[in-house]
């Protein structure tokens, strides 16, 4: 089972360096950790995703998604 988990983690990380290499620290922070309040300030009417059966994610960025999938 651990081999499958490692392969999944490798797959999820593949291409990350290429995808993020041109982002500065502000852009990287937005992509990973923008919170619902920050999202509302920039795009009124939008905020963090709400997942049925789970609730509102802590972040709008990738870290919000990962907070739900990591325990799985």
Image (cartoon, rainbow, N blue to C red):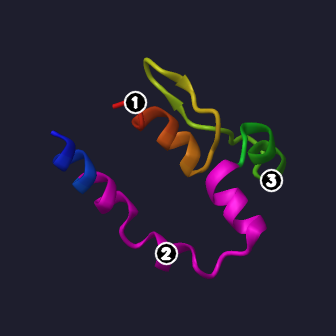
Which residue range is magenta in the image?
8-33
Label 2 Cα neighbours within 10 Å, binned few <14 / some 14-19 / many ≥20 = few
Dot 3 crowding, Cα within 10 Å, few <14, some 14–19, many 20+: few
Q: Is residue 49 above or below residue 28?
A: above
Question: At x 63% / y 82%, what residue is drawn?
Answer: 22
Determine whether 6 is above or below 28 in the image.
above
Q: Secondary structure at mark 2?
A: helix
Q: Quadrant of residue 52?
A: top left
Q: Position of residue 26 (x, y in %)?
A: 78, 66
Q: Locate the N terminus by quadrant.
A: top left
User: Hey, which quadrant is residue 60 in on the image?
Assistant: top right
Q: CA distance from mark 2 to mark 3?
A: 26 Å
Dot 3 falls on a residue whose secondary structure is helix
Nearest-to-viewer mark from 1 and 3: 1
Nearer to us in this view, 70 or 41: 70
Which residue shows up at 40% across the image and 73% down it?
A: 15
Dominant secondary structure, magenta: helix
In front here: 61 or 13? 13
Residue ID at (73%, 75%): 24
Q: Would you say 3 lies left or right of 11 here?
A: left
* Residue depicted at x 57% and y 40%: 64
Task: Name the residue beneath numbered marker 3.
Answer: 42
Q: Position of 53 compared to 59: left or right?
A: left
Q: Kindly check if marks 2 and 3 are in contact, taking CB atoms under 8 A apart as contact.
A: no
Query: Residue 9: x, y in percent?
Result: 33, 53
As drawn, is 9 to the left or to the right of 39? left
**Which residue is denoted by mark 1 in the rendering?**
71
Q: CA distance from mark 1 to mark 3?
A: 30 Å
Judging by the rendered image, the residue that carries numbered circle 2 is 17
**SS class, disc 1:** loop
């Amino acid at each position: 089972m651990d081999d499958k988990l490692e392969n999944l983690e490798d797959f999820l990380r593949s291409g990350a360096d290429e995808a993020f290499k041109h982002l500065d620290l502000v852009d990287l922070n937005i992509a990973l950790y923008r919170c619902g309040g920050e999202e509302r300030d920039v795009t009124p009417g939008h905020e963090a995703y709400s997942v049925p059966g789970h609730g509102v994610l802590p972040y709008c960025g990738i870290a919000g998604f990962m907070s739900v999938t990591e325990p799985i």
